[in-house]
Image (spheres, rainbow, N blue to C red):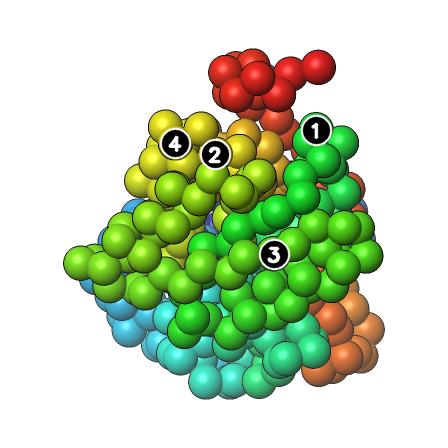
């Protein structure tokens, strides 16, 4: 489905193709609203893939490709859409991604988390130091396991950050390699489930672990292992606690990237954007069940 959005009564100042994975969310409403507030009043064509990779491919080939020259920017929602559109565009148009949990692992930013290849955007992941600071208001853990996919660059980065925080704050970090193989990953997770000496588990913005959130979180909960979760997908499936981004704020951040580009900044000058005031969520029922409630 394609829908054209705009600001009634105003001439359109730019044309944007908005490619989304599962319909418009509050993030897209925040994006459009902020662009209008900034005075841009864009014409926006919305292309909804409906959570279907074949439909996404059809949109790119049959809808976007023939009209690509008419768009000033391409907005993409989610990892699947953003990675696919990146390959499709090949840098021909500026791409602003949103709600991508692991932009580095998806090669959407450079190792310094700056824009690259005409692509920059917003992540829904909250930095590790904020996650740990909030989590330690609930429990003063001394050991923290982190299951991760060794093939993902972002995971190594997060482990390094956690180890640094551990040295500063007095807790140890135990990385657990989880191979991204349907026949092996649950076997790899067993040390986490059986480790009696680990106080808590940190579930990182690791694409493979996120894809298994509906299995991983219940397994850890059943094993009575407290969890600290880096993205909303884990919270959705019952994680004990996590600091998560507000989607409307993320949409506004994406709009401000467009504003900066219109004022002459290049993509490579703009860093990856984060929600500056994410929300700390605690599963109170699970907190009581784990005997952690004050």
Label 3 crowd (10 A; few <14 / some 14-19 / many >=20): many
Tell us which disc is closer to us: 1 or 4.
Answer: 4
Q: Is residue 282 above or below residue 159?
A: above
What x and y, as percent, mark residue 26?
A: 57, 38
Where is mark 3, residue-wise?
A: 173
Cα distance in 3D space between marks 3 and 2: 15 Å
Label 4 crowd (10 A; few <14 / some 14-19 / many >=20): few
Where is mark 1, residue-wise?
A: 138
- Between 112 and 80, the one lying in front of the other is 112
For the point 37% across and 70% down, the residue is 84
Where is mark 2, residue-wise?
A: 225
Q: Is residue 266 visible?
A: yes
- Choose the circle earlier in sequence order: 3 or 2: 3
Where is mark 4, residue-wise?
A: 223
What x and y, as percent, mark residue 178?
A: 36, 61
SS state under label 3 = strand
269 left or right of 76 in image: right
């Amino acid at each position: 489905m394609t829908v054209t959005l705009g600001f009634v009564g105003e001439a359109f100042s730019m044309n944007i193709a908005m490619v989304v994975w599962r319909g418009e969310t509050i993030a897209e409403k925040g994006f459009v609203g902020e662009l209008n507030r900034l005075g841009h009043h864009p014409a926006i064509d919305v292309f909804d893939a409906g959570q279907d990779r074949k439909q996404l491919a059809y949109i790119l080939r049959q809808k976007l490709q023939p009209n690509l020259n008419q768009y000033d920017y391409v907005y993409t929602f989610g990892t699947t859409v953003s990675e696919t559109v990146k390959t499709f565009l090949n840098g021909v148009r500026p791409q602003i991604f949103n709600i991508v949990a692991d932009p580095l692992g998806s090669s959407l930013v450079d190792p310094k988390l700056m824009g690259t290849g005409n692509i920059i955007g917003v992540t829904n992941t909250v930095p590790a130091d904020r996650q740990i600071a909030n989590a330690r208001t609930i429990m003063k853990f001394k050991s923290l396991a982190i299951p991760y996919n060794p093939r993902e660059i972002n995971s190594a980065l997060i482990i390094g950050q956690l180890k640094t925080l551990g040295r500063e704050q007095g807790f140890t970090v135990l990385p657990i390699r989880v191979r991204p193989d349907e026949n092996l990953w649950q076997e790899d997770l067993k040390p986490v489930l059986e480790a009696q000496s680990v106080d808590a588990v940190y579930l990182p913005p690791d694409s493979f672990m996120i894809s298994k959130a509906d299995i991983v979180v219940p397994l850890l909960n059943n094993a009575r292992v407290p969890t600290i979760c880096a993205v909303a997908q884990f919270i959705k499936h019952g994680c004990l606690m996590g600091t998560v981004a507000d989607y409307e704020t993320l949409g506004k951040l994406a709009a401000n990237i467009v504003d900066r580009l219109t004022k002459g900044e290049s993509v490579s000058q703009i860093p990856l954007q984060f929600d500056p005031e994410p929300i700390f969520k605690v599963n109170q029922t699970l907190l009581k069940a784990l005997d952690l409630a004050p």
